[in-house]
Image (cartoon, rainbow, N blue to C red):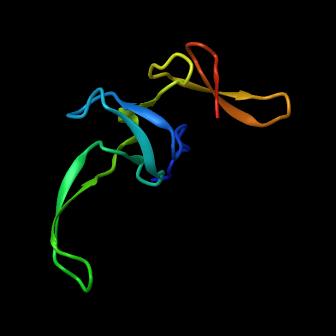
Amino acid sequence: MAATKLKIRKKDNVMVMSGRDKGKTGEILKVIPADMRVVVAKVNMIAKHRKPRGSEPGGIQHMEAPIAASKVMLMCPKCEKPARIRLERLPDGKLSRACRRCGEVIL
């Protein structure tokens, strides 16, 4: 299955729109375009049981698991709400993302 280009990037602020973490916001830590998934800070937390290895202690470690990219929406910095994104061509020819609600360019 070919991966499509995602309109969200690393370090974007997003809001989770469905699932057990609905309504939570956070920063994207990692984007996995091949699987159409993203890792969001403090969202979809799991407990991982690890054995001690070398200098690393063992125990239960809490970490973020990937979540489907379709479940998150980019937060507009101007209107501070989750927004659908459109791609706009700037006068210099580059593509940029813009909020469909207020038209603010999102870098």
Q: Foreground: 37 or 51? A: 51
Answer above or below: position of 5 versus 103: below
Answer above or below: position of 20 versus 66: above
Q: Residue at image x 72%, y 35%?
A: 95
Answer above or below: position of 107 versus 60: above
Q: Foreground: 10 or 35? A: 10
Q: Is residue 28 left or right of residue 21?
A: right
x then y, percent, for residue 90: 79, 29
Q: Residue at image x 69%, y 33%?
A: 96
Answer above or below: position of 92 versus 56: above
x then y, percent, for residue 94: 78, 37
Q: Residue at image x 42%, y 47%?
A: 36
Q: Is residue 22 left or right of residue 106?
A: left
Q: Foreground: 67 or 26? A: 26
x then y, percent, for residue 68: 35, 42
User: Quarter of the image holding residue 61?
Assistant: bottom left
Q: Is residue 50 left or right of residue 40?
A: left
* The C terminus lies in quadrant: top right
User: Quarter of the image holding residue 42?
Assistant: top left
Q: How many marks?
A: 0
x then y, percent, for residue 89: 76, 29
Q: Residue at image x 52%, y 16%?
A: 79
Q: Foreground: 96 or 75? A: 75
